[in-house]
Amino acid sequence: LFYWATFELLFQKPEKNPETVVEAYYDAVDYKRFKEAHSYFDPESGMSAEQHHLELSVADGLTLSYADMDSISAKVIEQRDNYALVEAKAHWFTPLNEFKTAKRHVLIKRKGNWYLKPDNYDESIPPDQFISQPSVRFFSQGKRRASTNRTPQYDVIDRPEMQILSSRLVSSEQGISVVGEIKNIDNFPAHITITVELYDDEGKPITAYNAKHGTLHKLMAKEIVPFRVDFERTAFWEDQDKRPDKMNPYEFRPFIFNKPPVSARVFVKAVAEKNDMNRTGQLRQMNITETDSTDFIQGKIVNTGVDEITIPQVICTYYDENCEVEWVDFSFVTQAVRPQREVHFKHDLQSLKNVKTLFIIKEENKYVNGLQQGTFIPENGKQNNCGDFSLDSKNKVKVMINSFIGSPTLY
């Protein structure tokens, strides 16, 4: 009896149990064993192996192209004679984040075996078969005359001029950050690098860090973007730091301040840019939903261009009553958006109760391309209109889309 039980445990087919069918399907898809994954579908569903493989191949995004499944668990929600409803909870890792999914699957029992009902894939059809889209493109000649000498001065493109509209040092649950807003006041598109240095009461530098995911690094002419700089120390530098057993894309070690920062300088460097200026991701049907636990904003991302948006990023800017940036947060959408299609997004809004302004960064501490901003730009005026939605009587929020295209069309 013992040997028979061991044999059943190790060698029984997954189809004998609804939970193991779901777990085996996820495992097969994660390891790209598509033929095996299709074998778990209901034979009478009409879904061929070729069609299933095709549906997976046309989909893209963080989940399907850049994610690795860390764990999967299945639980029977409802079960009758030949019917079962199973909820699958999966934990995924990507280079940018980690996320959890919960999905319910219907299973049918045929001839003693359990089979999955295939998902209902997107059957929407784009309005146009052939898309024509005019566009503005950029090209930099570099040296206009072939030469081994240094690039002549008249072939060097001036750095685009930026303007730091607002910046402040804030404290939150994540630690100390600097948030603000930058405008490209030039006529050229620009690639920007934002660096913030903090100083103590003696004027000595404490630390410096650059903006990462909390901004758009490619700016069109006259475009305004928010930014957030978080200060991070070197991970696992101290002897007492314990290294993680597995990858953590959220790994963040906030900087430990021995002295509180009393002043800060913001440095913005810009160079003329000609690539990755996609702005075809459009936001539609947005609304804010309030719940007891958290508020969130949701809507649709519509791709009006001719290239697939591989990884859409949602960036939210929170403004105070003076239309100055109080906080910036972001999230990544797990699905790609194909041309003339739409994807639903949901972003949890940050509570501003724990966000406190420590000080406003002075105008003389703002530098653009190595020059003090006030020496070539008059003191900026305040914006008259900011934010798409009102959170309360004081705060507003604006939503932007950063469209990363993994495989742009080359002409």
Image (spheres, rainbow, N blue to C red):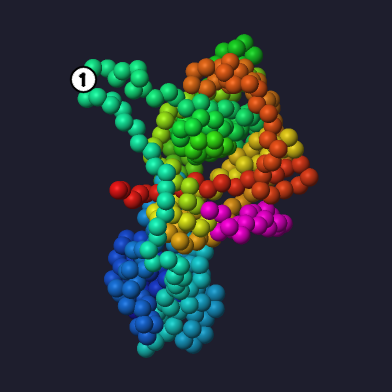
Q: Position of residue 62 (x, y in %)?
A: 42, 53
Q: Is residue 8 left or right of residue 327?
A: left
Q: Position of residue 76 (x, y in %)?
A: 51, 74
Reply above or below: 8 against 70.
below
Does residue 266 appear in the picture of this structure?
yes
* Quarter that holds the N terminus: bottom left
| Span shown in magenta | 282-300
Q: Toward the viewer: 318 or 74?
A: 318
Reply above or below: 352 against 169.
below
Q: Toward the viewer: 222 or 30?
A: 222
User: Which residue is depicted at the point 47% across and 51% down?
Assistant: 280
Task: Categorize mark 1 by other alpha carbons within 10 Å: few (<14), some (14-19), many (20+).
Answer: few
Q: How many numbered badges does the structure rendering display? A: 1
User: Which residue is depicted at the point 40% across and 73% down?
Assistant: 21
Q: Is residue 188 left or right of residue 324?
A: left
Q: Toward the viewer: 180 or 379?
A: 379
Helix, strand or loop under label 1: loop
Reply above or below: 233 against 107.
above
Q: Position of residue 47 (x, y in %)?
A: 36, 78
- Residue at mark 1: 148
Q: Is residue 120 left or right of residue 10?
A: right
Is residue 295 in the magenta section? Answer: yes
Q: Where on the picture, by quarter, is residue 318?
A: top right
Question: Mark 1 is on which residue type?
Answer: Thr
User: Which residue is depicted at the point 58% across and 42% down?
Assistant: 329
Reply above or below: 134 against 109.
above
